[in-house]
Amino acid sequence: MGPVNDLDSFAALRTEEGRALLAELRDYDPAQELAVATRLRREHPAGLVSAALGQARLRQRAAAKFGAEDAQRMFFTPNGVEQSTRRTVAAYRAERFAALGVRSVADLCSGIGGDAIALARAGIRVLAVDHDPLTAAVAQANAEALGLDGLIEVRCADVMETDSAEYDAVFVDPARRGGRGRIFDPEAYSPPLSWAITAARTRPHAALKIAPGIPHEAVPEDAAAEWISDGGDVKEAVLWFGTSPGTITATLLPGPHSLTGRGLPNPQVRKTGRFLYEPDGAVIRAHLVAEVAQELDGGLLDETIAYITADELRPTPYATAYEITDELPFSLKRLKALLREREVGVLTVKKRGSAVEPEELRRKVKLQGRNAATVFLTRVAGAPTMLIGQPV
């Protein structure tokens, strides 16, 4: 019983019978799928029941990205759920476009329409282009389901042959997954990053969504680069054209909180202070740890590791603060004794610059007790070290 994977199955879901089936499956429990499928097949064609159950599963998965209300009205493909931008991130980017005065966007590689929906909700007219007929049909259905088809035109076409001259901006989200999984070479994206950059330079404004692991030296000189995290998870990097060439920014959602690089030198290495700060992943990817360290009047524990140490507690959205109670050379025996003495039953293990696996460590220390603690396995001035503390 698979999800929708062809146009005929998808068309059947949009009939009156298909819509009624989906409404009936809105709150179904996947654990009861066999019983539900058996019951529904007495009244509906087996193929339609299979497609509806697949779609119901995808809608439940999509709720985390799109919110339950939108997800229950939208349609999805497995790739569409996997590759779509999270709603909060898409809305933030759409607001940035609107703030630039952009009134129309050619969304090239639009997928099932997640970004096009956010742009339309920001009042921007969108041309949504995807080369796959099923994906384009799903995008069209989503625009209609959310009442945005007046602002979104969906086109099934090759993005590399699409004329975007009449639009204020282009947005390109190249496919970064192939038959063998994630693609790391930007020239193996579909379309290639070099083509997307050329397309970006033809319009007054553009944004290109890329993998957050892109090397800084691959960022074009006429682009601004932004790393975005949502709820502490790094989601993407974006190359912006027509804004502030050469700037590097980390943006944290919700907020947004945006930190722009000032070209600071690496912070000094210093002794462990009372507080340890763990910078957000977007800050680390954007190479802006020095900017956060300066804000906190802090330094590094080790010149190669992105942990900041400081003597004072200062509020910052860009790092999570921990109060450090103990600093020990790495020793499983000493850690075990200390945790037993403190009656620690819940241990959070964080590591940078250590080969020890957190799960293996938890198993070996045999936790028991009513207290909680965090242990950082790291290096301090080059030496393997354990820092024990608590989140502030």
Image (cartoon, helix red, strand yellow):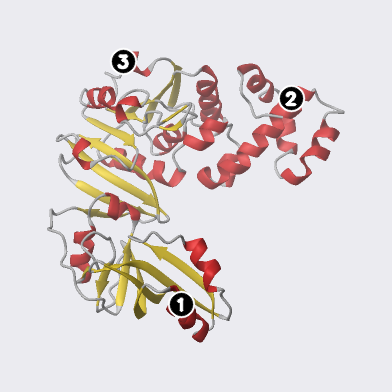
Could you say where residue 154 lies in the image, as x and y percent from the top left?
A: 46, 21
Q: The N terminus appears in which quarter of the rendering? A: top right
- In this view, the residue farthest toward the bottom is 341
Q: Which residue position is annotated with label 1?
A: 333
Q: Which residue position is annotated with label 2?
A: 48
Q: Is residue 108 visible?
A: yes
**Number of other residues with Cα within 10 Å of mark 2, as a class: few under 14, some 14 to 19, many 20 or more:** many
Report the amino acid beneath label 1: Lys
Would you place residue 24 above or below residue 317 in this image?
above
Could you say where residue 129 lies in the image, as x and y percent from the top left?
A: 41, 21
Would you place residue 254 above or below residue 213 in this image?
below
Q: Which residue position is annotated with label 3?
A: 163
Front residue of 15/233: it is 233
SS of the residue at dot 1? helix
Q: Is residue 57 left or right of residue 375?
A: right
Q: Is residue 28 visible?
A: no
Residue drawn at the location 72% of the way across and 25% of the way down: 16
**Number of other residues with Cα within 10 Å of mark 3, as a class: few under 14, some 14 to 19, many 20 or more:** few
